[in-house]
Image (cartoon, rainbow, N blue to C red):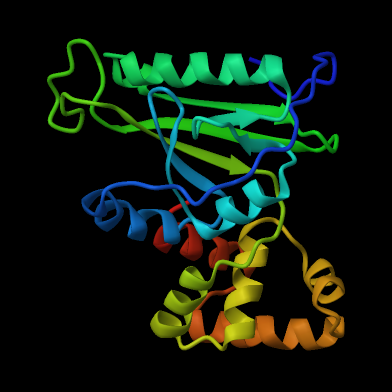
Amino acid sequence: MGVFDSKWPGRLESLACPEPTAPASSHDLVDGLLDLRVWPTMIVTEEARLVAANGAARAMLQQRTDWLIGPAGELRCSWASSTSEFHDRVKAVAAATAPVDMRYAECVTTTAGGRAVLMIARIGGGGHQATDEACETGPAHILVTWSDGTWRPNQSVCDMLVSAYRFTPTEARLSLALLEGHTVKGFAAATGVKTSTVRWHLRNILSKAECAGQRDLIKLLMSVITL
């Protein structure tokens, strides 16, 4: 697919980013799923029209860099050629009948020259001959996740960690930053505190979570947080 490759000209103009809309019943089903995802996560139709998005995704869409919302509510890449390929990929995942074809992932280049992982997966409906209970017939809904390594504190997940492990808000934010691949020094620089203070918070986190080290902590977080 090779989206966001600089060889493709024709950057789209910045478009307004309306709040995604969906029936109340749809929101009831997807809000929890989306809010507990660390990285920008969106649900789109097989035509790539945005149905719902978590807070990280809404913030990303407001930046209008790698992703934009088109006039018909469709999700667009910031480069025109990439948009058509992304839409084709969404349609292919929506129409797939084999489980292996119902999800897709690719490492791509962002507009800033960094690297990100694009993940697309069907979470319901679609398929011309779908018979599995997990793939009910009807309109397909596609889960799109964008992992670009950008630290975006997720309040819902932070609240969950505070409640489940009695972390402080700072400890919860540090835990998520480590999960996303950031270092202790990086977190210290981003938050304007001393590295020694961050290490102190980390020791408290490991003690409360009963983890021997950062590797065990990451495994724990990955087991309780939907990525």
Q: Residue at x 87, y 85 (%)?
A: 194
The picture quadrant where one finds residue 115 is top right
Residue 137 percent coordinates (x, y): 16, 24
Q: Is residue 2 visible?
A: no
Residue 125 percent coordinates (x, y): 23, 28
Quadrant placement of the N terminus: top right
Q: Is residue 182 left or right of residue 136?
A: right
Q: Is residue 34 visible?
A: yes
Q: Residue at x 83, y 67 (%)?
A: 186
Q: Residue at x 50, y 13 (%)?
A: 88
Q: Is residue 149 left or right of residue 118?
A: right
Q: Is residue 118 left or right of residue 156?
A: right
Say above or below: 71 vs 83.
below
The picture quadrant where one finds residue 193 is bottom right
Residue 205 percent coordinates (x, y): 58, 82
Residue 76 percent coordinates (x, y): 60, 29
Residue placed farthest to the top in the image? 128
Say above or below: 73 vs 87.
below
Q: How many marks?
A: 0
Q: Residue at x 70, y 60 (%)?
A: 151
Asked whether 23 or 41 is in front, the reply is 23
